[in-house]
Image (cartoon, rainbow, N blue to C red):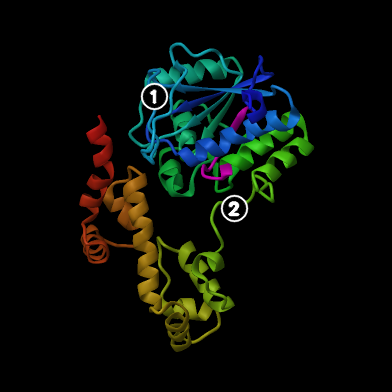
Amino acid sequence: MNEYAYGRAMEEARCTVGFLLVDSFSMMAFISALEPLRIANRLSGESLYDWKVVSEDGQPVMPTNGITEVKAAYSVDTAPDFEVLFVAGPFDPLPYQNQRVFKWLGRLARREATLGGIDTGSQVLARAGLLKGKRCTIHWENMQGFVNEFPDLQASHEIYEYDHGRLTCAGGTASMDMMLYFIEQQQGFELAASVSDVLIHPTIRHGDHPQRMSVEARTGVRHAGLLECIELMEANLEQPLTPGELAAMINVSKRQLERLFRRYLNTTPARYYLSLRLSEAKRLLEQSSMPIIDVAIACGFNSAGHFSYRYRSFYGISPRAARARATAPLKAAN
């Protein structure tokens, strides 16, 4: 079987899509964006798309899964002026400061290229100053750190956003939906739907689809009152509600609330609420540059000491040590 039968372009394609891969990028997010292009070629019987990988220095790039490096066709210094380029960002985007990359992206923007961010690629684009005045999104785990660094950007929790030449997505399988949208805009819905069918992706999600599973899906809980209580907890991490306030808001007594948590989750409301706050604190320590005291306050703790005590009791490690551990692989790589 020849390359074209698999969907690889055998002649000059109508559109060549560039992918800038940064070390520790998500392979799932990258492949979910690339494969729809290949399948669009195969189903159409035409060379609609070609794709080229770019790395900072032209060397192979290692994804987070560590299985194999991905070869690059170009460095940012030798790459052509792509009309469309997607940035697949690093696992930890916060320390990323490559001015050569930022200048190259800026040059493509001035030439009116369509620029996309996959997963934390949105943070790379934002740091290059290329998302100003644009709606954008990023993976929910990185959202708080993103908003903290770029409070003036129009960041959403949707799976992908398109706004005047900027196409950003949350990563994971959201890359597939984003690229199906891209194909639909260029080639029509029929081809996009056929590509989705081949990918065994029965529903093409619109951009406004939420990133996270519902509370019911995440917890397995079916009780409406308990689900409402958990949603209230998740929405009020910085200023936690008391058990009495929670019970009143879902029209049950405190004792009934205790029984619900015991029956469905085998824990107490206070313990469950604390686990939500500490889980969010863990994400902020690992995915943002917020000072530890600010992380504590954002998660409803009045003092760094109390936060440290609770965090160590829950995770067996101090907040400071947790942050150091999260950044250790990056330091070692450098």
Q: Which residue is at 55% across, 48% downward?
A: 157
Image: 42 above or below 245: above
Q: Which residue is mark 1?
A: 60
In the image, what residue type sits under mark 1? Pro
Q: Is residue 90 left or right of residue 215?
A: left
Tell me residue 140's x, y (percent): 48, 49
Mark number displayed over residue 133: none
- Quarter holding the C terminus is top left
Mark number, residue 210: 2
223 up-or-down from 148: above or below: below
What residue is shown at x 51% (from left), y 64% (from top)? 218
Badge 2: few (under 14), some or many (20 or more) residues near its Cα, within 10 Å? some
Left or right of 49, for residue 80: left
| Figure quadrant of the N terminus | top right
SS for callout 1 = loop
Q: Nearer the viewer, mark 1 or mark 2?
A: 1
Range covered by the magenta-colored residues: 164-174
The residue tagged with tag 2: helix, strand or loop? loop
Q: How many numbered marks, from 0 up?
A: 2
Q: Is residue 163 visible?
A: no
Front-lying residue, 26 or 198: 198
Residue 162 placement: quadrant: top right
Give the percent coordinates (x, y) of residue 111.
Answer: 59, 14
Residue 334 is left or right of residue 49, and the answer is: left
Query: Marks 1 and 2, how far apart in space?
Result: 34 Å
Residue 235 visible somewhere in the drawing: yes
- In the foreground, 86 or 26: 26
Q: Is residue 313 magenta?
A: no
Identified at 63% across, 35% down, the residue is: 36
Which badge, 1 or 2, is on the more N-terminal residue? 1
What amino acid does circle 2 point to? Answer: Pro
Picture quarter containing residue 26?
top left
